Amino acid sequence: MREPAFWWRPGGGGLLAPLGALYGAVAWRRMAAPGASAGVPVICLGNLTVGGAGKTPAALAVAHLLLAGRERPFFLSRGYGGRLAGPVRVDTSFHHAADTGDEPLMLARLAPTIVARDRVAGAKAARLGGASVIVMDDGFQNPSLAKTISIVLVDAARGIGNGRVIPAGPMRAPLEIQMAHARAIVVVGPPAGATTVIDAARRYGIAIFHARLEPDRNSLAALGGRQVLAFAGIGNPDKFYATLAEAGVAIAERTSFPDHHRYTAAEADALTARADAASLVLMTTEKDHVRLAGDAGVAKLAARAVALPVRLVIAEHDQFRQMVLDAVKRR
């Protein structure tokens, strides 16, 4: 399902505002509930809104810092889009996106990853597996597990849209209650579009970091200047296209699909046919490529498509690193 365009327009969603207020009140009460202890520190990466803002690259960046600090991080994910309820430890040689969802497969390339719809049970599995710290990819609004610190990602290009709560807008809960539970925000991209969130963070004394998504240079060099047909089924496909454009990639065509989209054989054939007709390189995100892998019906597209890895680069790297490592020291 695609997000309504009015979510991202100032003043949009007025007719649905009463429903948004009701949803927000429920979310407010849920977030105020105390969570169970994981027995180890929990660092949570989350969004204020639905859609992508860079949680997975941020989770990977945090895990890299923890590994460099000689910790044993385990990722904990709900496994959205996968069929396994868990708790289950992701095995990249065995599991596919249909089992665990796309994000856990990406995370498991770096560190042990547990998929569990019951986050408390997942945290227990991680601790028994040897985790010294848990990195949660999403779950900021879920109160079941107590967090040591919560780090919120904000896409500066979209900000918080109309500022209303689902279904009137993209907010997962009212801004004030979310700010009250956050330790830091990471603004991804030029901060002009995130002034409302930045002002709220300052009122609450929340640390503010600035970041950008940096595409893999080797993948870009391999294009050799050729034009691409870019396609993506993520929370914010425009962010992917903007990353390509900023890197100097010539986008001849672009096709967007809903978040976590499972490609059909017909869609795969159509994309490859269009690329062949115009002599274009098929380029997509890592998440999309993970979803394509292991699906026989889209094998041709998986083989042809070039994935563009990105990493989150934080301007205030030293301060961010210290915040993460200090959180682990609280145990």
Image: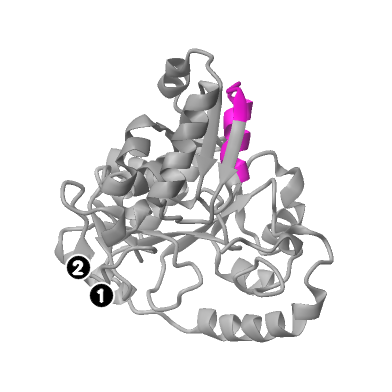
Instruction: Examine the image and state in which quarter residue 293 appears.
Output: top left
Whether 211 is drawn above or below 246: the answer is: below
Q: The residue under label 1 is which amino acid type?
A: Ala
Residue at image x 58%, y 33%?
243
Residue 274, given in percent of the width and then of the height, sits at 52, 32
Query: In what quadrant of the picture does the N terminus appear?
Result: bottom right
Q: In the rendered structure, which segment of residues is drawn in magenta?
A: 238-252
Residue 307, given in percent of the width and then of the height, sits at 41, 34
Label 2 sits on a secondary structure element that is helix
Q: Which residue is mark 2?
A: 125
Say whether residue 72 is left or right of residue 222: left
- Whether tag 1 and tag 2 are in contact, CB under 8 A, the answer is yes
Label 1, residues with CA under 10 Å away: few <14, some 14-19, many ≥20: some
Whether 80 is drawn above or below 321: the answer is: below
Query: In what quadrant of the picture does the C terminus appear?
Result: bottom left
Label 1 sits on a secondary structure element that is helix
Residue 36, given in percent of the width and then of the height, sits at 34, 79
State the separation of the CA atoms marked 1 and 2: 6 Å
Q: Which residue is mark 1?
A: 121
Instruction: Examine the image and state in which quarter residue 138 appears.
Output: bottom left
Q: Is residue 71 magenta?
A: no
Residue at image x 31%, y 48%?
297
Label 2, residues with CA under 10 Å away: few <14, some 14-19, many ≥20: many
Residue 280, given in percent of the width and then of the height, sits at 51, 24
